[in-house]
Amino acid sequence: MANVLSVQIQQAILALRAQGRSIRRIARELGVHRNTVRGYLEGEEAGSKCTTISTSWIPSKCTNSTLGKIGRKSLCDPHGQWIQERVEKGLSSQRIYQDLREELQFSGSYQAVKRYVRLLKAREPERVPILRPGDFWGRGLNSLN
């Protein structure tokens, strides 16, 4: 487990810095090393949303949350509608990839197509009919007569 200061100490570092105290004085008052204080302050100034801090004082490899569309665009994006149609037909990712290569001269990898198809399937959950008491697969008892 990484060495991470408690939330109270992290907040105290920021509060004391906001009062204009030096890094050495903050470190002395809180009983932590001055480089630790400096690291937390630099992380806050950079607007980092990381929950950990690099203990070697090399820039952290921590990445921000990737919820939503963050990062570079997929090579599949220009063919999104085409891929969506194939997914709705029930074709596998492998088959979609093969068709992309043949028909559209797709230069991306199978892994890229597989990730894209997985995202498409996750966005639209399968619809399940809601049955009420007395229903027989969507038809009421009256329709059986």
Image (tube, rainbow, N blue to C red):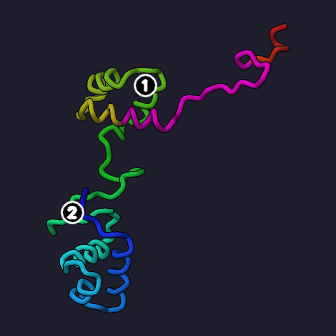
The image quadrant that residue 132 belongs to is top right
**Residue 66 appears left or right of 127:** left
Q: Establish if 86 lies above or below 115.
A: above
Furthest residue to the top? 145
Q: Earlier in the sequence, mark 2 or mark 1?
A: 2
* Residue 49 on the magenta segment: no
**x, y percent for residue 112:** 29, 36
Which contiguous range is marked in magenta? 116-138
Which of the labelled discs sits on residue 16, or is there none?
none
- Taking the spot 36% from the left edge, 91% from the top edge, the residue there is 19
What is the quadrant of the N terminus in the image?
A: bottom left
Q: Secondary structure at mark 2?
A: loop
Label 2 Cα crowd, 10 Å radius (few <14 / some 14-19 / many 20+)? some
State the image quarter where residue 33 is shown: bottom left
Q: Residues within 10 Å of mark 1 (few under 14, many from 20)?
A: some
User: Of 18 and 8, which appears nearest the observer?
Assistant: 8
Of the pair 144 and 98, the residue shown nearer to us: 144
Asked if 34 appears above or below 140 in the picture, the reply is below
Measured in 3D between alpha carbons, the distance from the residue under mark 2 to the one under mark 1, in whole angstroms, is 41 Å
Q: In x, y percent, where is residue 55?
A: 18, 66
| Residue, disc 1 | 86
Q: Amino acid at mark 2?
A: Ser
Residue 4 location, quadrant: bottom left
* Apparent side of residue 59 relative to residue 141 in the rendered image (left or right): left
Name the residue nearer the viewer: 2 or 98: 2
Which residue matches tag 2?
60
| Residue occupying the point 36% across, 40% down | 78
Q: Is residue 127 magenta?
A: yes
